[in-house]
Image (tube, grey):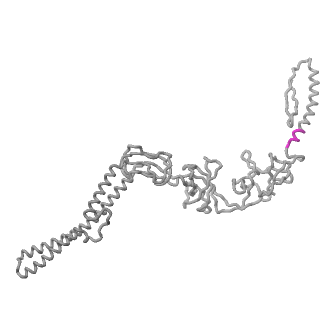
Amino acid sequence: MTVIVCSGHGQEGAFRRTETDGSPSNFMKRFQYLAGAATFAAFLAGGCSKSVSSSMLGDASHPTPVHVYRVAEEIAQRRVQAAGSLFALEESILSAQVEGRVSQVLADVGDNVKEGQPLILIDPQELQLEVDRQRGLVTQVRAQLGIGPNDPPPSDPKQLASVQRAAADLFDAERKYDRAQEMFKGKLISQQQLDEAASRFQSTQAGYTVSLQEVDRLKALLVSSEASENLAEKKLRDATIRAPFPGSIKTRDVHPGEYLRVQGPVMVLVRTDTLRARLAVPERWAGSVKDGATVDLQVEAFPGETFHGRLSRINPSVAQDSRTFEAEALLTNADGRLKPGFFVQASIPSEKEEKTIFLPEGAVNYRYGVYKVFLLNGNHVSEHQIHPAGQTDDQRGKRFEVAEGLKPGDLVAVAVSGDLHDGATVQEQPEGNTPGQK
């Protein structure tokens, strides 16, 4: 036979099971036991009930101390919530500008490089020979012009020795032709001799003209030869592929000994000291988001940490499939903690201002997907559901923005310690000059 007995321990009642064997010889004992047990159970029931009721918080004799906040409207600048990704400030595919065999690879994936730092070396032997050949041609042309290795081309061709020699021959031929004409008039020479003097004069005159044209040709050849020399020297310099900006090596596509063709890709270099955060902003905020605004950014890699960027570009068009427009913010990343490709959540200030209600984070209770507060009515509190519009963290601390459920003038109670329950008796305890406090 089983008997259930209430056993009071502390503030809660407990039950235990007592087993009897049910034999006839013990019938009277069992009867007396049951009668006594019934009386004892009634006594304990009163005791257990009294214990539970006295343990409840917030009764009339033991009011719960609370802080009270009076609900008031504030003018708040609306913030736009957007999501996006991080991109490198610059990402370049480096390629070869000259052909040749790779002699050395000086950087690998993940290396941080400086602007101008050598990354790939191409065998320079053939390129050096071409430079020497072009330099020889330039020296030869300068010698024909009669100028030194650093002298500029002559501005007056008549100052050159070759032209002066042709001019002297022309002068001599002209004088002889003049004398031949005088002598022919005096019948001192024959017509043939006069014709020979005239022919020699015309020949030297043509030679003088050719000497002037030769100077012009040599000057043009000098310009061309020096350009070829500079091009050969540039190709020699291009045999060393350098970093165009400071950054990190993303990929490497060549190995020592490979033969590179012109425009053959060798590496991908990304610049990460500054990053671009490209954000998808809903189209309804198109008139409220402006360039230059400071954007708060958060990434999953560093939970609870906020990074700051500055809005630099806004796409003028809206994507028809997503009904969003792209906004780009620049943020410094000197320590390299942030990586291109990170997913980011951004909070962008807008020019839109609205009246809204805020509550301290501790005044809002969240259970099973429902947000509730305790409204003060006299010296009792009642549980009341609200609909928050989001959270903010500013100079006044972490607060909830309330979209529905409260109106200005409502009194919200927050337990100093422990928890409140619906209908609890409370007693206000001052907390100093807290914003929004009654």
Q: Residue at x 33, y 49 (%)?
A: 125
Query: What is the residue that sits farthest to the bottom in this orientation?
Result: 186
Q: Is residue 330 left or right of residue 359?
A: left
Q: Is residue 223 left or right of residue 277?
A: left
Q: Tell me where residue 71 appears, x and y as whole percent.
A: 78, 57
Q: Quadrant of residue 350?
A: bottom right
| Total number of numbered discs in the rendering | 0
State the residue in front, 161 or 432. Answer: 161
Q: Tell me where residue 239 appears, x and y as whole percent.
A: 38, 51
Q: Is residue 248 left or right of residue 352?
A: left
Q: Main secondary structure of the magenta part?
A: helix
**Residue 70 visible at all:** no
**Residue 393 visible at all:** yes
Q: Quadrant of residue 41?
A: top right
State the residue in front, 267 or 127. Answer: 127
Q: Tell me where residue 420 appears, x and y as whole percent.
A: 81, 47
Magenta-drawn stretch contains 224? no
Quadrant in the picture for the C terminus: bottom right
Q: Is residue 208 above or below residue 296?
A: below
State the residue in front, 412 or 219. Answer: 219
Quadrant in the picture for the N terminus: top right
Q: Is residue 14 left or right of residue 245?
A: right
State the residue in front, 70 or 130. Answer: 130
Q: Is residue 203 above or below residue 33?
A: below
The magenta segment: 50-56
Q: Tell me where residue 324 appears, x and y as whole percent.
A: 58, 56
